[in-house]
Amino acid sequence: MIRVQNLHFTYPGNEVETIKGIDFEVAPGEVFGFLGPNGAGKSTIQKILIGILKQFRGSVRVQNTEMRSAGSAFYEKIGVAFEQPNLYSKFTALENLRFFSTLYRHATADPLELLAAVGLESEAQTRVAAFSKGMKMRLNFCRALLNHPDVLFFDEPTAGLDPVNLQKIKALILAQKKHGRTICITTHDMHVADSLCDRIAFIVDGKIALIDSPRALKLQFGARRVRIDFAENGTLQHAIFELDQLGHNQKFLEILRHKQIETMHTQEATLEDIFIQTTGRKLA
Amino acid sequence: MIRKMIALSLADLKNISRESTLLLVLFAPLALLLFLRFALPQLSGIVQAQFDIDLREYDLFIFAFMSLIPSLLFGMVSGFIMLDERDEDIIAFIAVTPLQKSGYFLYKLLSLTAVVFAFFFVLTGQAGLVQLPLLSSVVLASLIALEAPIGALFLAAFAENKVEGLALSKALGVMYVGPFVAFLVDSNWQFTAGLFPPFWIAKAFQHAVQLDLTFFLYAAIGLLVHLVAIGLLFRRFAQDQR
Amino acid sequence: MRLLNILRYDALFQWRHRFYHAYFLLTILYVLALQHLDGAAARMAATLFLLSDTAPLGFFFIGGLILLEKGQRLHDGLFVTPLTVLEYLLSKVLSLSFVALLSALAILLAAFGGIQNAALFVPGFILSSAFYTLFGVLFAVHARHVNDYFAKALLAGLLLCVPVVGLFGIADHALFLLFPTKATILLIQLAFGEVNTGQQIYAFAAISLWLIAAGWAAYRGLWQHIILKVGTQ
């Protein structure tokens, strides 16, 4: 689906490479996340993948198109939504979608159905100027789905959203995954990466520092332990146990049986911990 | 209030110099001055030869019309600053600072009016086209200065964004047929153009040299028309802001 | 097909932003003014109106149009679809030339009762109008604000206007032939049947060359300043 080999990229006029030789593959139907601080090269990689930047070295193939020669036909197959919505504010939601659908050759999705899917069906005739940021982001999301794309690219899809809209967008992305679409997400929000992505790549200084599934990473970098906080004689106590053979750990079982448990947490690492541990940098 | 306004002025000046808008604002009146002083006499000769029209008979009209141009230009420039800022939500930002929206617009409109007022004296002094009594000049400069906020408010009140502002600025230009009608149409039908504020300035111009009662009559009507126009536009504008 | 679609929406956009209304008003105004003049004076005034306002209609609006699209980040949405840069430019140029042409035809028909050489005037006027729009694109891609656009574009535009002094008979010079404005003046005067065959050939050749040059530069400018920045914060 996506295959990148030995990719190098330097912005015109710059001496230092922005992308310093990266390789990765994204399988069909996979949700792949690029995680990294601002300026690490996430957006540059995405701009290469969507055919905006073409003066790169190495090989980049998306849907069997060599990106150096990607033209109109390539854009029939992909959908892109950037962090900032891009819509005509003087046109209604429906007019915006109708307009963008006319740019595609192939049969496009029904704008009204798309609007319904993101909960904007009652706002179809409202001008975008009157929309909130969350509504604009959802409409922008519809825009990216108009052409039934095989591959979807989302740039910071949740930036600046309130918790309600954040959940809505996340659900929408997961629904697209169910349809079997390949999805690339760039983000510096590790919670988003954690909850949405099958695999993530840590991008630091134009290189991939680490690439794996969030689950595997958390287990690999975390401790296989559980911490229990419980009340004893009116004070809060805690105890830590190895996960292995936990069912046979008498002390653990005793606490379970006789103490009043307040909280219980496994000690796997968060993506943020792992990021700091492997790159020596903070995410945001 | 005053201190805050000075702070805003400085920010504006910085903006202007960085954005080459200053070039436009300074260059255009300068070009106007040069035209009146050097090109017009040349042009008069040619028009006389080619079409047998003596432009010197129209000196007062030409000067009246030209002296209105800076107000149109400055009005448009500040109208577009407001629209650009609205498109970028800067007005919303300033509204939450202590200065408040009304203070912000008062500042914009006052500074605009002051600049246009001052420029009129440069023009009368340097163009060498007509000699006006000082009192006439002061009255006319005041009226012309009030013209600028009309343009700015017209754009800010009726245009939703800068592109619509551009279309409306074309319509705004239509207002300036007022002086043409005042000078070139002889019948009483000319007073239908009194709906356009510049018409009354032009009428006052016709009596500015004599400085007679009619001058003050037209000036008074002009003042009234301008204030009413500004008031209506400001109300409409304030409604939009809510 | 894609071009037709985006053209339709560009026209709708311009209608919604009252381009047509504004030029309807101006057209009436020009016609009224022209009725007070006669003969050579009317023809010269009409040439001036068409040259200074109607033909460069696109030049006047393109700065605001591109800036507004920039502000609404529409380029991010447009250039990740099959739409090409060429189609985008063509649509802008044709939709704006259309308004200009409508206004020009209305002025000429209403004020003079007819147009001579209409079969030549129409394409000539469209070429001229297209040139000024593309010339504006060169400045629009750099501009940050409408005033910023006008400051730079008008100054450059004034330079192009040097041959206008020839129109008034103040001075004429062979070098004026190098200016696109000279070609435009002749292409407008076609409507009055005042242009000989040699001048016609010159005017069409010159405006075509200028159009190609401006088109190439506008295309490059758009790539460098808009497309490469797609998705940039």
Image (spheres, coloured by chain):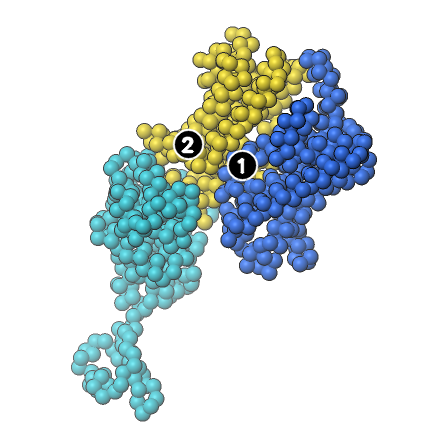
Question: Chain A: what color?
Answer: cyan
Graded by Cα atoms within 10 Å as few (under 14), some (14 to 19) or many (20 or more), the crowding at tag 2 reads many
Q: Which residue is mark 1?
A: B168
The circle on residue B104 is none
Q: Chain of mark 1?
A: B
Is residue C138 at all visible to an observer of this figure?
Answer: no
Q: Is residue B174 left or right of residue B201?
A: left
Residue furthest out toward the front: B188
Is residue A198 at all visible to an observer of this figure?
Answer: yes
The relative height of residue A85 versus residue B136 in the rendered view (above or below) is below
Q: Chain of mark 2?
A: C
The relative height of residue A195 versus residue A8 in the rendered view (above or below) is below
Dot 2 falls on a residue whose secondary structure is helix
Q: Type of residue at label 1?
A: Leu
Q: Nearer the viewer, residue B139 or B195?
A: B195
Residue C150 in percent (x, y) is at 58, 35
Dot 1 falls on a residue whose secondary structure is helix
